[in-house]
Amino acid sequence: MANQNYNPFENAQTQFDRVAELLQLDEGTRQLLRQHRQEIHFTIPVKMDDGTTKVFKAFRMIHNDSRGPGKGGIRFHPHETADTVRALSMWMTWKCAAVDIPLGGAKGGVICDPRTMSAGEQERLCRGYIRRLKSLVGYNIDVPAPDVMTNGQHMMWMLDEYESVTGQRFPGMITGKPVGHGGSLGRTEATGYGVVYCLRECLKNMDIDITKTSASIQGFGNVAEYAARLYTELGGKVVAVSCWNAEDKTAYTFRKADGCDPAALAAIKDSFGSIDKAKAIELGYEVLPGDAWLSQDVDILIPAALENQITPEVFPNISKQVKIICEAANGPTTPDCDALIEKAGITLIPDFMCNAGGVTCSYFEQVQGNMNYFWTKEEVLEKLENAMTRAFQNIYDLAKEQNLYMRDAAYVIAIKRVAAAVKARGWC
Ligand code: NAD
């Protein structure tokens, strides 16, 4: 479960305030950037299969669009809140700015549980969501994408509804479309691979041979799986992965001291990233409590599941061997733990840099859609690798030059870019 003691939007504002102060940002820009340009809260009535009508609460927010149209996913989750959407849209602004793509920060969500809804009910929910937002989204306004528990099929229903009400074809109004229907090759791998491009560069800078390192990962969903695959291909050893078990309503850590096999684990997980416990035992994995991923004697920790997982309370459980925390998830570390990580001399690759591979590939999807010409997977991944490597190195170099914690260095670069756009437009 996500840690309920922390509010992600307050975390996002705390991180921003710290760097706004460091940069001596003027008060107007500070006020503009710590809030949202637009928040839409609405309801979607959906006819359910049993003939009743259910009303779902939904959100779409644009944090800042000074550098380009809003960009960000739509989550379908029973625990979605206005504050998670606020935090995630704010982090999208910094993410797009950190990798220097011409997009702003946005996010959406619906409080629902698609696991308990039929395909027809989900389709009506998607169509209702986008019908309500028809004049507020678009390739040049705000571009949604899949996120937690939404996928390419949901995007296609939304695209079709949008095009039906507008009477024109607008493939660029949404990304994360399936390959063959306007989607980009490489999108499935993009976020996890991007995490490892950052990690690989970080290790090079620290003069550490990746083949002599080990890692422990929280999560085994889309991001974690592809991070584990590429890290293993590059010679690293994944010692443990954890994931949620819906049947037992708890998380487990699956451990293999001589190295997990990501492909074998992927073959025994379901579409929500849960590994089959019995099959894992058959394959020789030890099954430990969910939080055991954090206390492994490894060089690298990769939180790739939920927000608010690394807190002052659990920090003492982290092994002294850990040199790098690679934030693949959004907001996995609480602001009150940053000081402890920094003091312990652990290098932290901050979330909005580390997991920016996904949005970078979404941007490539838009670019390819605009040209109506699609690149090969190799071309997409090569461009992704270049973009991620360049952005990471800028942040790493700034952190070294100015003796900054890497999260602060990433914020300095991102905030400066957004503040410059806001100023150039004459908003502040
Ligand atoms: P996913 O839904 O595919 O996988 C989530 C994983 O977390 C699953 O394996 C699930 O079992 C596990 N999990 C859930 N609760 C857990 C718990 N208590 N302990 C251990 N494991 C638990 O999600 P994803 O797309 O891989 O995203 C993971 C994180 O990365 C999220 O924070 C998401 O916002 C962020 N992210 C994803 C993308 C993307 O392209 N998918 C892009 C940027 C950021």
Image (cartoon, rainbow, N blue to C red):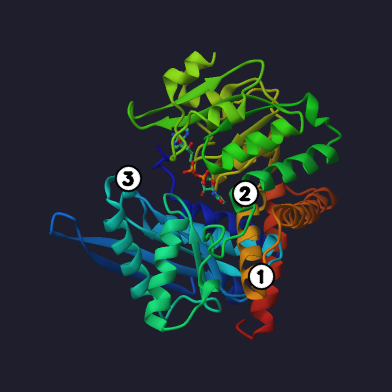
Q: Position of residue 277 (x, y in %)?
A: 43, 21
For the point 65% across and 59% down, the residue is 360
Circle number at residue 66? none
Would residue 78 be seen by someone viewing this image from the given angle? no
Task: Say which element carries label 1.
Answer: helix
Q: Position of residue 115 (x, y in %)?
A: 32, 45
Q: Quadrant of residue 64?
A: bottom right
Q: Residues within 10 Å of mark 2 (few under 14, many from 20)?
A: many
Taking the image as shown, residue 399 lies to the left or right of residue 102, namely right
Q: Position of residue 208 (x, y in %)?
A: 83, 31
Q: Residues within 10 Å of mark 1 (few under 14, many from 20)?
A: some
Could you tell me how many numbered marks the image carries?
3
Based on the displayed image, in which of its 4 quarters is residue 140 positioned? bottom right
- Amino acid carrying label 1: it is Val
Q: Which residue is mark 1?
A: 367
Mark closer to the chain start, 1 or 3: 3
Callout 3: SS: helix
| Image quadrant where one finds the N terminus | top left
- The amino acid beneath tag 2 is Thr
Identified at 52% across, 70% down, the residue is 143
Report, in whole angstroms, how far the alpha carbon at label 1 lies from the one at label 2: 18 Å
Residue 387 visible from this viewpoint: yes
Residue sitting nearer the eye, 425 or 247: 247
- The single residue placed furthest to the left in the displayed view is 51
Does residue 342 sit above or below 248 in this rendering?
below
Residue tagged 2 = 191
The residue to which callout 3 is attached is 115
